[in-house]
Amino acid sequence: MSIKEQLKEYGVDEVLKAIGLIKSSNFLKGGNARGWIITFDWFLKPSNFVKVLEGNYSDKADYKSKLTNKQNLQGVYKSVDNKDLEAMLENKRKNKEV
């Protein structure tokens, strides 16, 4: 599934929430037995995206605070390296606000 399809199905806020939840997951950032780190392609697979969004990979102590801390999610959004993705998400958000 492409990022455009994820945005269409889940909306900007849910995609941003999932990105924020990646930051709260030591497992997805390599803190696992194999040292595996999430890739963008893995994240976009529908079943994986849903698992991330549901918090299945979140460090359990931080999960609830990450979901409710909108400022933190905005900070995560600003740290995304993929400038094209960032611009697309920002444009989608602006279109929603109008």
Image (spheres, rainbow, N blue to C red):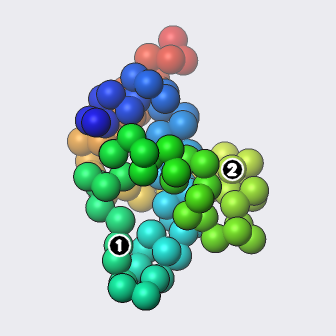
Q: Secondary structure at mark 1?
A: loop
| Residue beneath the point at 69% across and 50% down | 67
Q: Secondary structure at mark 2?
A: helix
Q: Residue at x 28, y 36 (%)?
A: 1
Q: Which corner quadrant of the image does residue 75 belong to?
A: bottom right
Reading the chain from its start, which is encountered first: label 2 or label 1?
1
- Can residue 95 be seen here? yes
- As measured in the structure, the alpha-carbon distance from the residue carrying label 2 to the one carrying label 1 is 22 Å
Mark 1 = which residue? Answer: 37
Where does residue 81 sit, x and y in percent of width and height? 30, 57
Which residue shows up at 30% across the image and 29% down it? 4
Amino acid type, callout 2: Leu
Q: Is residue 2 left or right of residue 32?
A: left
Q: Which of the two residues, 64 or 34, is positioned nearer the viewer here? A: 34
Residue drawn at x 45%, y 69% as measured from the top left: 28
Residue 7, horizontal then vertical, whole percent: 40, 29
Q: Position of residue 95 (x, y in %)?
A: 44, 17
Q: Pick out the residue farthest to the bottom.
A: 33
The residue to which callout 2 is attached is 67
Left or right: where does residue 48 sit relative to residue 98? left
Query: Of the residues tagged 2 and 1, which is closer to the observer?
Result: 1
Residue 14, percent from left and from top? 54, 37
